[in-house]
Image: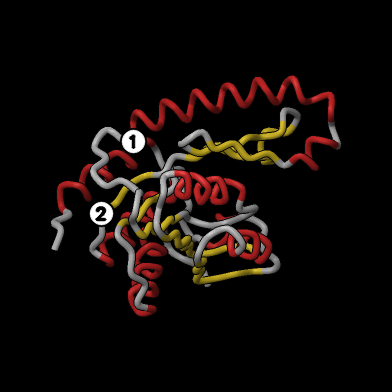
Amino acid sequence: MVFDTRQDAGRQLGHRLQALGVGVDLVAGLPRGGVVVAAEVADVLQRPLEALVVRKIGHPWQREFAVGALAEGNVLMLDRAAMAAAPLARAELEMIIREEKERLRQYCLKFHRERRTGFAGNRVLLVDDGLATGATAEAAVCSARNQQARQIILAVPVASDSAFNRLARMADQVIALVTDRNFQAVGQYYKHFLPTGDAEVLALLHQQHADYRPA
């Protein structure tokens, strides 16, 4: 299955969740691309949309290779095995963690200006545009737990088999439209996979907050 855009993936995911009878109190997208998917899911399910901020921690010598993740609520997760293979990179890693913590703080200030719905006691649906390693999604699940979410469901259009299994041990439920043992990159499952900017995320959050009317 190949999706046209993140919006297309979000609509399909929302309708699948609706057909499955998934009941949640709010939808939280992982910035940036996950918020685009989550906005469509929230629209289909008629639930409020929020953002749960996460940041990937890249290896000091190869920043695209994730060795951990940060999430709001002081969540820090590191792949100790990956770092053990390069102990000399530890000092550089500490610098990267400090940088990413500051970026996380700035994004929380930016994306939570209009936050209306807290996680505590609520059934939370976490949404991303895809799961490759699952590192950032795992940090997001831990963050939602720390914020005392009553139930945590993770939903994505596509996931690698390994990431799906990894998150199934963390979240109360994981739902993916596509799982692939030969997964290489999230973008290969989209015809159009353009970068998502902060302005687009803010516009989606603002619009959904303006449109959402509790039953």
The residue to which callout 2 is attached is 48
| Nearest to the observer: residue 19 or residue 172 | 172
Residue at x 17%, y 54% (from the top left corner): 212
The residue to which callout 1 is attached is 111
Q: Give the answer, above or below, for where 18 lies relative to 11.
A: below
**Horizontal arrangement in the rendering, residue 52 relative to residue 214 (left or right):** right
Q: Give the answer, above or below, for where 153 lies relative to 210.
A: below
Residue at x 59%, y 22% (from the top left corner): 98
> CA separation, marks 2 and 1?
14 Å
Image quarter in which the C terminus is found? bottom left
Instruction: Identify the element where label 1 is drawn.
Output: helix
* Mark 1 Cα shell of 10 Å, populated few (<14), some (14-19), many (≥20): some
Instruction: Identify the element where label 2 is drawn.
Output: loop
| For marks 2 and 1 on the same chain, the one whose residue lies earlier in the sequence | 2
* Mark 2 Cα shell of 10 Å, populated few (<14), some (14-19), many (≥20): many
Q: Please identify the quarter of the rendering in which residue 121 is found.
A: bottom left
Question: Tag 1: residue type?
Answer: Phe
Residue at x 37%, y 44% (from the top left corner): 51
